[in-house]
Image: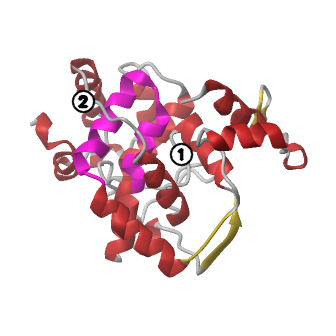
Amino acid sequence: MDKKAKDILFKTYWTSAGWTNDDYRKTDPADFDYAKSKGVMFDPFSINKSGLVENLKKLVNKISKEDISNAFLCSLTTKQFEFRSAIGSYANAMRIVNGEAVYSWDLQEKYVDEDLNVLNFERLKWGGVRHSQALYNYFDLNLFLNLQIDKPSKQDLDIFSKILKAISDSEIGEYPSKLRDRLKDVYKSSKDERSNLLEILACCKILQPASYDRPTTGRNDWHFVEYWRGEDKYDAKAVYYYFQRLF
């Protein structure tokens, strides 16, 4: 990815203090044209519901599950979060096109002049934070087609095995935040990275709550993983679905 284009995108939305205030989210036209020419920034985007769903169907049929899982695994060592994001978008897109689990996706009747640039910023910085949204799934998977996917290394596989072991070691009643803390002992990463990793695993139903009738801690940023508890461990069938070559 072109470093200058990525810097232009990031400076539009982020400062050392966090998010740029909405009033200051402006990109110099020449800088925008440069970032756009490199496929990093985009013009406003419009589409209706039927068109979005139809495009999602084409994408999930075109993209191989092996590429999706390989990209996720490789991201564990490379920290290229755009590779990690796609597995969550793939999982949610599959639910959308199959009409499953309405709670897990947000699909509007139409989208008008949507800002794809903030979606790409979130995708590159954290691996995406809107996997429940159909527009993000479409955008993410469409860009995934342009990525060069390598096979995961032994180190990638070892890290993933350690992550699964940490999940398996979770105790009854433990909340997602406890698992996030547990992961820092087996996977060098920031708190935000671990949070997003858990969300992606839950989006893929690897972290699958046994019940949604559970108390929560109130204010939190969890979505897919909010009702998971330590006794749920991980869903072996979901792991096998995405990573069957590990077994």
Location of the C terminus by quadrant is top left
Res. 161 in view: yes
Report the side of 114 relative to 24 (left or right). left
Q: In the depicted view, which residue is nearer to us: 30 or 80?
A: 30
Across and down, in percent, residue 158 comes to 23, 22
Q: Nearer the viewer, mark 2 or mark 1?
A: 2
Report the side of 127 relative to 163 (left or right). right
Crowding around mark 2 (Cα neighbors within 10 Å: few <14, some 14 to 19, many 20+) is few
Amino acid type of the residue that numbered disc 1 sits on in the rendered structure: Gly
Across and down, in percent, residue 6 comes to 64, 32
Local secondary structure at mark 2: loop
Q: In the depicted view, which residue is nearer to us: 58 or 111?
A: 58
Q: Which residue is mark 1?
A: 128
Residue at (52% x, 56% y) in the render: 139
Report the side of 92 relative to 108 (left or right). left
Q: Is residue 70 magenta?
A: yes
Q: Is residue 94 magenta?
A: no
Q: Which residue is mark 2?
A: 151
Distance between mark 2 and mark 1 Cα atoms: 22 Å
Crowding around mark 1 (Cα neighbors within 10 Å: few <14, some 14 to 19, many 20+) is many
Residue at (59% x, 35% y) in the render: 125
Residue 233, which numbered label? none
The image quadrant of residue 170 is: top left
Residue at (66% x, 51% y) in the render: 42
Local secondary structure at mark 1: loop
Q: Which residues are magenta?
A: 63-89
When the figure is inspected, residue 138 is found, relative to residue 246, above or below; the finding is below
When the figure is inspected, residue 51 is found, relative to residue 172, above or below; the finding is below
Amino acid type of the residue that numbered disc 2 sits on in the rendered structure: Lys
